[in-house]
Image: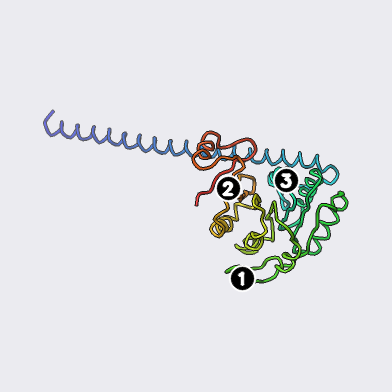
Amino acid sequence: MSSGASAALAAATAAGVGYRSTVGRRSLWLGSLAAGFLGWHYRDTAHRLERAIRSAEDAAALSVSLQSAAPIFGRWAVEGDFAGMIARELERSQRLVVECGSGVTSLVIANQLRQNGSGRLISLEHDAGYAARCTALLQRAGLGDFARVVVAPLRRQQVGEKTVDWYDRNVVEEAVEGEIDVLVVDGPPQISPWARWPALEVLYPRLAQEAVVLMDDGRTQQTTAHAWVERFPDLDLYWIDTLKGTWLLTRRDASGLSGRLLRIARMINPRPAGFGRWPVHR
């Protein structure tokens, strides 16, 4: 074979090996990408299922407690996991609970207060008809002594530096007397990005030292949650991975840990029994 032919054969062989090598690398890269995506999809699906199971368990437990007055959880109503979180927070025998938005949560809160033997609920509702129905449900369940639904129509008003549609502030300030131990924010309807932001702006001065704030629909309320901690730097913000997502704000960590010890504890056990609290760094 002539030197020219040998060189041509060597070049063709090298090109073939290079082509196969390129194809192999590309296949390996695509395979790794597909495997990574499938792994992420599996973990995400398993995590969603875990959330749904926890929520169903909470709904079942609350339904047993409420017996014939048990509501239907989910869909337009509050999910079982958020209602369960509220009930657990109220096990510490609270004195005053205020909620923005009445409904299923009103029954859950009033029932827990009845079991505690103390405390009262002030529920703010913008719709008079819905407020009347909620009051009737509370009365039929024998919970009327522990809860009061206050009709506070939405008003276009100045709150802080923003002009927003929120509950009539005059009605709210007249209805809410004393220090608030638990503030539940599940209303008014999300008609604007800042619809629920005024809750803390208006009621922060009335929060007890160890008050807890719980906001539902957390996956759509990130802007509000972060605005709150910017405005009130003494509050710590936590993400609770419920079905709709929950933001929790408190002045102290319930575990008694802080700083580096708290971070280490969460690294060791990032998903404790129930729902993990995920700190949100400023």
Name the spot of residue 256 as percent of width and height, x first: 59, 40
Q: Residues within 10 Å of mark 3 (few under 14, many from 20)?
A: many
The residue beneath circle 3 is 90
Q: Is residue 23 left or right of residue 242?
A: left
The residue beneath circle 2 is 238
Label 3, label 2: how far apart the Cα atoms are: 18 Å
Q: Looking at the picture, which amino acid does disc 1 mark?
A: Thr
SS at badge 3: helix
Name the spot of residue 252 as percent of width and height, x first: 59, 47
Q: Check the image and name the residue furthest to the top.
A: 1
At a point 72% along the width and 40% down the height, the residue shown is 58
Label 2, label 1: how far apart the Cα atoms are: 27 Å
The residue beneath circle 1 is 163
Nearer mark to the viewer, of 3 and 2: 3
Can residue 38 be seen in this snapshot?
A: no
Name the spot of residue 262 as percent of width and height, x first: 53, 40
Q: Check the image and name the residue furthest to the left.
A: 3
Image quarter of the N terminus = top left
Label 1, label 3: how far apart the Cα atoms are: 33 Å
Q: Looking at the picture, which amino acid does disc 3 mark?
A: Leu
